[in-house]
Structures are given as C-alpha cells and as structure tokens.
Image (tube, helix red, strand yellow):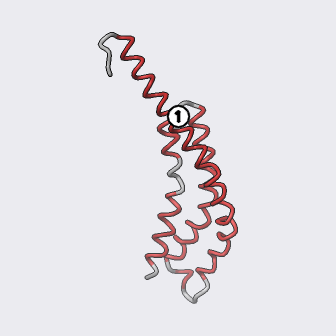
Amino acid sequence: MWITNKEGVIFCARLEMVKLQIITKVTLILATPIYCLLALPMASMAPLSFLAFDSPGSDTMLAPWIFVIGMMSLPALLIAAIVVGWVLYAAKKYKFSLLSLLIPLVSVVLIGLGVLMTK
C-alpha cells in the first residue's frame, strides 16, 4: 500500500529494490553451478565440432562455420555470464545482472542457425 507522505513512498521503493536484490541473488546462486556444470561437457564437445568440416566442400559453406563458432564460444560465454552477473550484482545493478545470464543465448542461437541452415 502506498502511503501519501514522502517517507512511505521511499520505503515502498526500497522494498521493491530489496525484492529485486533477493531475486537476483537467488537466481545467481542457482545459475552458477548449473552454468559451470554445463560448461564442462561443452568444453570437451567443442573441439569435436570441427568435424562439421569433414565432408568435401563444407569448408566453403556458411552453416558449418556458424555451428563451430557457436560451439566453441558456448563454454566461454557460460563462464563469462556468471562472472559478469556477479560483478554487476556487486555493483548493485540487479536488472543488468539478471540480463547478463542471457549471454550464452548468443551461442545457442548460432548453434541452432548452423544446424537449421544445413537442412
């Protein structure tokens, strides 16, 4: 409930900030082990993505290049998302911290484009 005096409005704004801080912290705590566990197998699978160039003429096609770039960048972007998320959380930029967890979607989109372009 909004109180009409100035102190009540500031209190409600602070309450919203505290809610956002708690949501961001819980999300980062949950995302950190998940992203780290995803980065381990992806780091071992990434070098195998070069097998996309195995067929003749595939080195001149665009789809294998997009797929390989997506696969090679995914482990690094998973770790970068966690690091950037925690740095932004420490800087009290909670909304940007949550948005930084979407950084690996760039690689997922590239992998999807690479797969869809081959068919």
Q: Secondary structure at mark 1?
A: helix
Q: Residue 71 at what x, y percent from top left?
A: 59, 67
Q: Which residue is mark 1?
A: 22
Choose top left, top right, bottom left or bottom right for residue 88. top right
Extreme-left residue of the structure: 4
Q: At x 65% / y 51%, what residue is drawn?
A: 33
Q: Residue 95 at what x, y percent from top left?
A: 47, 38
Q: At x 54% / y 30%, what residue is drawn?
A: 92
Q: Residue 37 at what x, y percent from top left?
A: 66, 58
Quadrant in which the N terminus appears: top left
In front: 91, or 64?
A: 91
Quadrant in which the C terminus appears: bottom left
In front: 31, or 42?
A: 31
Give the amino acid type for the residue marked by disc 1 in the picture.
Ile
Q: At x 29% / y 13%, what residue is drawn?
A: 4
Q: Is residue 24 above or below residue 51?
A: above
Q: At x 68% / y 72%, what residue is drawn?
A: 47
Q: Is residue 34 above or below residue 119?
A: above
